[in-house]
Image: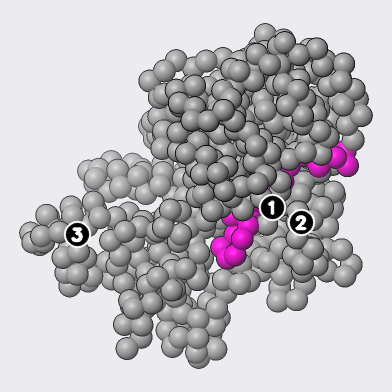
């Protein structure tokens, strides 16, 4: 397979696809989509590349992006690659101290920002930092507050008036796969983030591998960029879409995704398990409100779908005629209507990763014919380590290991990796680099698991695994994944390290508890009195016991504490990728935790 360096990729694609639409974007949900052709994508990339040259960007310079998902993010990426410069993306939800650390650690002199919230934080950082010299604003409705700020339109004008085309072309021709492409700062559940260095060789290898594993992906497909482009999963997926000619719709605000899906009806879209958990909960809630007759039809359809899709199609076996006929009827009555309601009637590939996905959801969606592709990866592995193949995938695993990646199991059942997609190290952090690799060059993932055939089975993050005071090991994510399938539970953090039994801090769905209180005529004056009501506790206790059926006795939650305010990024309990900061929760809710062990 021919490898085209990312410095030149957009221009090659423009020659191939011309006026065909590459990117779609809009500012507000009610707006019409604005289209950017491959030709325009290429032209804007060149203009911004020249403007950055005029601003003094040199080969190897680090340039930041601090924004929600916008088409400009991708255009700037490729403009930086044309200059052999390095993109350093930052989560739009990041705080000023987080941005300040990344700016200073990676030496960012130019920072592209999205909307007002990011601009205000960027200005705060600029006033403190000796490094940051210039801010470029994507959103023209944000008012500039100093002379060091440029609108993107002004940058484009600078590029249009530049005669540096020859210099940019020379940099493109000199671009090498050893050049550093990105520094992606992991959000981290403890301490400062670490800058994961991904050279172009990692990106090229990721494209090559996914072309082998997803051969049918083409310019006929459409994808929605829903997860933050800062996240390695969405970033590499969008790079793959660009390399394969897929038309991409940029979803600006995560909260708008349900409407965007219904409007776009994509063939492909990345998501994290929480998205599918919410879909599953909503579907189950709707089924529970149906008449017994309709519930019976749904149960029949689900059984047919499970047999057809999992016992035959999954195993590449030809379904018998009678089953095919029943499936066709069930599809017309149930599956097709449900997929159309969600907006997934055209879906052919829906990658999901980033956290644990319950087998219950995975089996449910696959039975419906919703093509979830579950996988596992890390920022340090340029995303994918393994994922479900089209046929033969096994539930309970995170899929088949990608081609040409070495995977083995080390001490404490740690998954170890070696290959061309493995990062070159943490930026400016020799101590972390030393700890990250084994003596024979394998990367320590920090994830526990084992290999069965060509499939990986994950257990938990090693640092999250804990042992009760009776010596029983607990995998908290296993328990948490089960509990958040209940519509009355929004978030849960399992506690129990060196404790006699397992407990939990739970952020419940206040609206669902209010509905239950109204139904049962339970009086309450405010949220606090609602959560303190013994009847509410008993109601949730019964639901939790039901959700934990089949689990080992030592894994069962004996007590729990309800909190009014959910865990949040701003509150410090969640990372930017929505992972629980268990140490923060342990400290913040120490009083409630201690009370559960009295």
Residue span colored magenta? 177-193
**Residue 177 pos. (x, y %):** 88, 38
Secondary structure of the residue carrying numbered label 1? helix
Label 1: how many residues lie within 10 Å, few (<14), some (14-19) or many (20+)? some
**Residue 334 pos. (x, y %):** 39, 35
Say whether residue 35 is left or right of residue 534.
right
Residue under the point 54% across and 83% down: 467
Q: Which residue corresponds to mark 3?
A: 527
Say whether residue 447 is left or right of residue 421.
left
Above or below, comparing residue 259 to residue 109 in the picture = above
The answer to which of 9 and 87 lies nearer the viewer is: 87
Nearer mark to the viewer, of 1 and 3? 1
Q: Which residue corresponds to mark 1?
A: 105
**Residue 562 pos. (x, y %):** 29, 67
Give me the C-alpha separation between circle 1 and circle 3.
43 Å
Are the residues tagged 1 and 3 within 8 Å (C-beta)?
Answer: no
Q: Earlier in the sequence, mark 2 or mark 3?
A: 2
Give me the C-alpha separation between circle 2 and circle 1.
7 Å
């Amino acid at each position: 397979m021919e490898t085209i360096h990312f410095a030149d990729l957009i221009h090659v694609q423009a020659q191939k696809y011309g006026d065909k639409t590459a990117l779609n974007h809009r500012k507000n949900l009610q707006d019409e989509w604005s289209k950017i052709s491959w030709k325009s994508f290429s032209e804007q990339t060149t203009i911004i590349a020249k403007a950055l040259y005029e601003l003094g960007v040199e080969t190897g310079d680090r340039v930041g992006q601090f924004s929600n998902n916008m088409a400009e993010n991708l255009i700037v990426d490729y403009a930086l690659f044309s200059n052999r410069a390095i993109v350093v993306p930052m989560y739009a939800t990041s705080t000023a101290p987080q941005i300040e650390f990344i700016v200073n650690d990676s030496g960012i002199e130019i920072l592209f920002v999205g909307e007002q919230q990011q601009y205000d934080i960027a200005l705060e950082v600029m006033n403190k930092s000796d490094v940051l010299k210039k801010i470029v604003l994507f959103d023209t409705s944000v008012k500039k507050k100093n002379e060091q700020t440029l609108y993107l339109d002004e940058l484009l004008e600078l590029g249009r008036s530049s005669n540096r085309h020859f210099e940019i072309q020379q940099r493109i021709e000199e671009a090498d796969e050893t050049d550093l492409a990105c520094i992606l700062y992991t959000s981290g559940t403890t301490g400062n983030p670490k800058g994961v260095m991904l050279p172009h060789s990692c990106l090229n290898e990721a494209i090559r591998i996914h072309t082998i594993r997803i051969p049918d992906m083409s310019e006929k497909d459409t994808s929605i960029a829903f997860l933050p482009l800062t996240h390695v999963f969405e970033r590499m997926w969008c790079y793959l879409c660009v390399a394969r000619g897929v038309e991409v719709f940029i979803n600006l605000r995560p909260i708008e995704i349900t409407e965007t899906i219904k409007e776009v009806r994509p063939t492909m879209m990345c998501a994290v398990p929480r998205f599918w958990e919410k879909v599953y909960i909503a579907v189950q809630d709707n089924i529970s409100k149906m008449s017994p007759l309709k519930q019976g039809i749904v149960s029949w359809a689900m059984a047919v779908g499970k047999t057809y899709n999992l016992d035959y199609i999954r195993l590449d076996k030809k379904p018998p005629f009678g089953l095919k006929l029943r499936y066709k009827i069930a599809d017309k009555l149930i599956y097709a209507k449900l997929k159309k309601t969600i907006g997934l009637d055209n879906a052919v590939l829906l990658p999901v990763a980033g956290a644990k996905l319950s087998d219950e959801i995975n089996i449910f969606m696959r039975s419906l014919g919703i093509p979830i592709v579950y996988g596992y990866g890390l920022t340090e592995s340029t995303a994918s380590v393994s994922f479900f193949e089209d046929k033969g995938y096994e539930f309970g695993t995170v899929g088949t290991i990608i081609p040409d990646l070495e995977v083995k199991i080390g001490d404490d059942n740690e998954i170890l990796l070696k290959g061309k997609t493995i990062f070159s190290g943490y930026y400016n952090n020799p101590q972390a680099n030393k700890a990250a690799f084994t003596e024979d060059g394998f990367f320590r993932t920090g994830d526990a698991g084992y290999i069965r055939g060509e499939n990986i089975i994950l257990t938990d993050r090693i640092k999250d695994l804990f042992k009760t005071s009776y010596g029983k090991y607990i995998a908290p994510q296993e328990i948490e994944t089960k509990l958040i399938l209940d519509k009355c539970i929004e978030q849960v953090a399992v506690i129990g390290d060196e404790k006699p039994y397992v407990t939990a801090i739970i952020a419940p769905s206040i609206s669902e508890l209010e509905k239950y209180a109204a139904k049962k005529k339970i009086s309450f004056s405010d949220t606090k009195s609602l959560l303190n009501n013994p009847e509410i506790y008993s109601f949730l206790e019964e639901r939790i016991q039901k959700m934990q059926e089949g689990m080992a006795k030592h894994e069962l939650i004996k007590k729990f504490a309800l909190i009014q305010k959910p865990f949040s990024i701003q509150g410090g309990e969640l990372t930017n990728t929505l992972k629980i900061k268990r140490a923060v929760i342990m400290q913040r809710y120490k009083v409630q935790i201690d009370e559960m062990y009295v």
